[in-house]
Image (spheres, grey):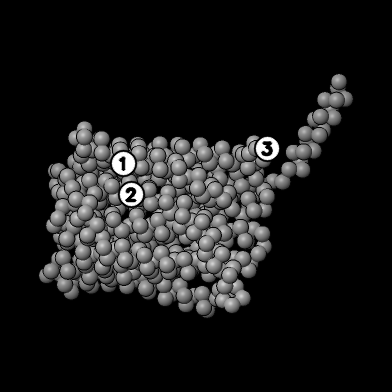
Amino acid sequence: MRQHDSASATAQATAVSDRPSVKPVLMPMLSLSTKMTLAQSAPLLMSVVVAGLIAQKSSHSYAAYALMASFNMPIFIAAASMLQALYFLGGRALGRGRDDDYRVAMVAGFFFSTVVGLVCSGLSVLSSQALLLLGVDTELARAAYGFGIANAVGLLPALWVVVFRIHVSLRDRPGQATGVYILGSVCGAVLAALSMRRWGGDPAYASEMAIGAVSVSNWIMAAAAMGILLVLKPLRFDWQVQGARIRAAFAEVFAVGWPIGAVVLLDSLMLAFAAMVAGRYWPHAVPVHSVAALWVTFALVVPLGISQAVVQYVAVAHAEGDPRARNHNAGVAMALTLVFTAIAVVVFTIAAVPMGAVILGPLAYQANEAAALRQIMPWAGLVLGLQGVILVAAAILRGLGQTRAPFFQALVGYGVVGNGGQWILGVVLGGALLGLWQGLALGFGVTAVALSWRCARQLDATRHPILQD
């Protein structure tokens, strides 16, 4: 008996010693997440600056701009999110050592971004008419017409830059994307300020020109990105030789990307639905609501950076057949996200009115606006954190090649619980803005729990293949 126990213990010790050690990933992932966050925070910071310029010049123009953005932003974000399929396809190719497959995937990504960019531009031009059909206040909807056209000009280059950012990130050069975004953001902020100064006598026209300046900055970023690609190492390809492979990769980008885009679209439509309801029933409250939504969008770059880092780590480890390292990477990313969630709730609660004043100026300190900000900003912080959990869980599933799974959770959590909760708590029960944000938290909360459970289950199943049967 003792000999059997001794042999068993020896075998267990040998198995443990033979098990490959997991490389420390916290600091590398934190570093990559920070670089990805910085790369995307620059244009969003520019958006905050431009929104502040418009809001402090005319609250009516800012409300019209915010409603235009609430219609267009979900579409653009969904389009950009479809391109996240390149993280999986590129990461898979790198994990298998197939550089040729990698180049084909990136070239297909540029073609794909061109097609969806043109579609997004057309929808932006029609945004004013869409707002009218959705029952938004007529004056605000008509005032959004010029903003929709100005916004459309810059959507195509913005999507090209997304592909560039993914490419340099996968090639361990995320700093290049940061430089490009900083260049474009500085140019956009300066041009917007000059526009407001030049046409300041006409607040509506000056505001439209400021948004046009942002579109110009997107073309500046795209030119800088293409210049870097040409100088360093172009993605050369021969269409006659590789045309069929590029078309196949284009189809795969769509096949992998559409569920990602659908989930993100449902996510974004939750905030858009809230904006539409506010614009219809409480148009005077649209500026305060839009401030909270803008800060959520801005701060979301932090979990977005974590998600873009973890999808690379998970995809490569999964392709290499190392489930232990892959699951460890996923756990570290989720832990970072939960820490961020706690910080977000505290900051949004403590600094509710000052954060509103960054956009609205002195208006934020008036009694009604200050009270509304104190009511909804803590909920906005919670919504931000829950969105972060959803982003990271979905990114982990993308790294495993599971892109359709999050769609079903999002369809119920966003489409039924979230939008239904907003309507019941905000309109039916008279909660107004507070009810809208409580409904948002309910929808995101249900989705975050469901998606996290699915993620943990999938990681366990792929670690023990017998469970998949």
Of the two numbered discs 2 and 1 on the same chain, state the one appearing first in sequence.
Answer: 2
Which of the 4 image quadrants contains residue 179?
bottom left
SS type, badge 1: helix
Decide: few, some or many residues near mark 3? Use Cα within 10 Å; few <14, some 14-19, many ≥20.
few
Of the two numbered discs 1 and 3 on the same chain, state the one appearing first in sequence.
Answer: 1
Q: Residue at x 26, y 68 (%)?
A: 150
Q: Residue at x 41, y 64 (%)?
A: 116
Q: Indicate left or right for 96 with 29 as reference.
A: right
- Is residue 197 placed above or below 274 in the rendered structure? below
Q: Residue at x 37, y 42 (%)?
A: 414
Q: Residue furthest right?
A: 3
- Is residue 405 placed above or below 185 in the rendered structure? above
Q: Indicate left or right for 440 with 315 as reference.
A: left
Q: CA distance from mark 1 to mark 3?
A: 39 Å
Which of the 4 image quadrants contains residue 157?
bottom left
User: Foreground residue, 14 or 117?
Assistant: 117
Contact between marks 2 and 3 (CB within 8 A): the answer is no
Callout 2 amino acid: Leu
Callout 1 amino acid: Asn
Residue carrying label 3: 466
SS type, badge 2: helix
Contact between marks 2 and 1 (CB within 8 A): the answer is yes
Q: Which mark is residue 419?
A: 1
At which x and y percent is residue 218? 36, 70
Of the two numbered discs 2 and 3 on the same chain, state the one appearing first in sequence.
Answer: 2
Q: Residue furthest left?
A: 201
User: Foreground residue, 202 or 319?
Assistant: 319
SS type, badge 3: helix
Residue carrying label 2: 269
Callout 3 amino acid: Ile
